[in-house]
Image (cartoon, rainbow, N blue to C red):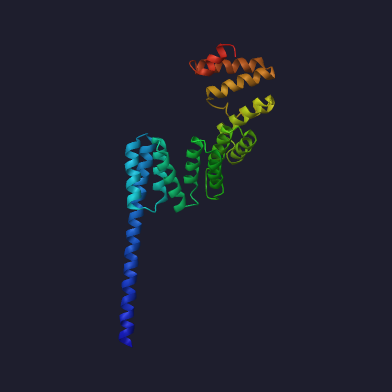
């Protein structure tokens, strides 16, 4: 009996050693895949698409279960216009890690760019439901922009307002809400929403909207001030051309 216990103990120890060895191997694979994925993301941000593809592909080869590697492949294939591969890669990333909000936001952005509007908004809303997602404002903004693509202004307005609740200084959401209210002829509200985008160095489109808002409100001094800033900072812009043509 003692011999049997001794043999059984040895078997347990061998099993633990094997388990520990397997764990170390899995950790090494994941670490290596993570490094290649981070390199791929860096190359992608520098528009070095071919090298990014190599890194993400290597990461997914080393660790096929690493969701972020497949997310990276989705972004690369989307940039290359290989939509079927992009779609499959994003779906693979989400199936491996359904709670990964970044993958869902990126997939939503891809879907929106292909005019698959309802599908994209489903992904954006799945992203914001993750309590650990730290940039929910981006997903709300993307949902709003995508809603505008199908002329769904009412829902777009809600999404932009949600974005501002998360990040009150988000210029793009404020600008979009200003534009929505300008088109509704609610010029005072449009002016209020423009206060944030006009801080710092406003874009040509922000200044052009501000000019038209102040024109409707009858504030000639403010209109002239924004017009001067537009001509000075963006002399070759389409907005300046529109201003000079009398629009």
Quadrant of the rendered image containing residue 217: top right
Quadrant containing the N terminus is bottom left
Q: Residue 199: give x, y in percent of width and height.
A: 57, 27
State the count of labels. 0
Quadrant containing the C terminus is top right
Q: Residue at x 31, y 77 (%)?
A: 10
Q: Residue 42: give x, y in percent of width and height.
A: 37, 39
Q: Residue at x 64, y 21 (%)?
A: 213
Q: Residue 241: give x, y in percent of width and height.
A: 53, 14
Residue 7 lies, with reference to residue 246, above or below; the image says below
Q: Residue at x 39, y 47 (%)?
A: 69
Q: Residue 239: give x, y in percent of width and height.
A: 54, 18
Left or right, 105 with respect to 212, comes to: left
Q: Depth check: give the residue in front, 89 or 15.
A: 89
Name of the residue lying farthest toward the top? 245
Name of the residue lying farthest toward the bottom? 1
Residue 240 lies, with reference to residue 7, above or below; the image says above
Q: Depth check: give the residue in front, 91 or 59.
A: 91
Q: Residue at x 68, y 27 (%)?
A: 184
């Amino acid at each position: 009996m003692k011999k049997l216990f001794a043999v059984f103990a040895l078997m347990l120890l061998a099993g633990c050693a094997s388990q520990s060895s397997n764990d170390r191997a899995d950790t090494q694979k994941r670490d290596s895949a993570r490094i290649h994925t981070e390199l791929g993301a860096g190359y992608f941000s520098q528009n070095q698409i071919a090298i990014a593809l190599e890194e993400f592909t290597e990461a997914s080869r080393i660790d096929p279960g690493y969701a972020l590697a497949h997310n990276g492949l989705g972004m690369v294939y989307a940039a290359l216009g290989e939509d079927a591969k992009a779609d499959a890669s994003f779906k693979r990333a989400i199936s491996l890690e359904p709670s990964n909000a970044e993958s869902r936001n990126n997939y939503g952005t891809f879907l929106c760019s292909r005019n698959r509007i309802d599908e994209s908004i489903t992904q954006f809303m799945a992203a914001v439901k993750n309590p650990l997602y730290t940039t929910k404002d981006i997903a709300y903004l993307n949902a709003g922009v995508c809603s505008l693509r199908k002329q769904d202004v009412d829902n777009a307005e809600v999404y932009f307002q949600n974005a501002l609740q998360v990040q009150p200084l988000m210029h793009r959401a404020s600008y979009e809400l200003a534009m929505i209210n300008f088109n509704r002829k609610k010029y005072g509200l449009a002016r209020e929403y423009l206060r944030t985008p006009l801080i710092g160095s406003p874009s040509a489109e922000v200044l052009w909207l501000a000019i038209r808002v102040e024109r409707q409100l009858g504030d000639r001094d403010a209109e002239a001030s924004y017009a001067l800033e537009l001509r000075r900072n963006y002399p070759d812009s389409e907005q300046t051309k529109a201003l000079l043509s009398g629009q």
